[in-house]
Image (cartoon, helix red, strand yellow):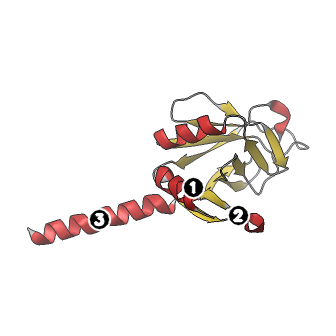
Amino acid sequence: MRGIVQVALVSSVLVAGDALAEWSVSPGAGGTGCVLESSAESLSDGYQVTTARIRVDGKTVSVSSPSVLDPGFNDIGLAVDQEALLPMDRVADPRTAVFESRYESLVDQFKRGVRARAQLRFWPTWPATGPHSATFSLIGFTRAYAQLAGCR
């Protein structure tokens, strides 16, 4: 019986560790504050496989990809579970969609949710290929977000 309990405890620690590993806190650019970052998720950009990553810095939520975003159709956004797609506010650079006007609401949805879907559109100067999505696990987000608040 004791062996079964030990195996169960080790398994639960490993699962919790994996969930937190999908979200990590690291120092922000320029040494100011910290950034909470998701694991990279694969998606098609219409021409090749690329990745996307969600970042939270205490003021904004952003989605970045190595591929250039196409903001011309107003359909880049984030949706948590069955909630409506929240459109981005702006493209900060050609590869990053920024969500700042509804930051608090989006973070609250992340804390309550199970999955977030980033809907992106790529390559504004090429023939349009439509929106493409990547799904991110939100398991471990709340604990990692608490670490972000305590990070200096």
Question: Mark 3 and mark 2 in contact (Cβ < 8 Å)?
Answer: no
Q: Which residue is at the front of the view, 54 or 40?
A: 54
**In the drawing, what numbered circle is on residue 11?**
3
Q: Amino acid at mark 1?
A: Ala
Q: Amino acid at mark 3?
A: Ser
The answer for how far apart the CA atoms under marks 1 and 2 are is: 13 Å
Report crowding for label 3: few under 14, some 14 to 19, many 20 or more residues within 10 A (C-alpha): few
Q: Position of residue 78 (x, y in %)?
A: 64, 38
**In the drawing, what numbered circle is on residue 149?**
1
Q: Which residue is at the front of the view, 41 or 108?
A: 108
Name the residue at the right extreme.
125
Q: Amino acid at mark 2?
A: Gly
The numbered mark, 1 or 2, whose residue comes first in the sequence reads 2
Left or right for 33, reference 91: left
Where 76 falls versus 51 (above or below)? above
> Visible in this render: residue 30?
yes
The answer for how far apart the CA atoms under marks 1 and 3 are is: 28 Å
Q: Secondary structure at mark 2?
A: loop
Which residue was labeled with disc 2?
28
Q: Position of residue 61 (x, y in %)?
A: 67, 46
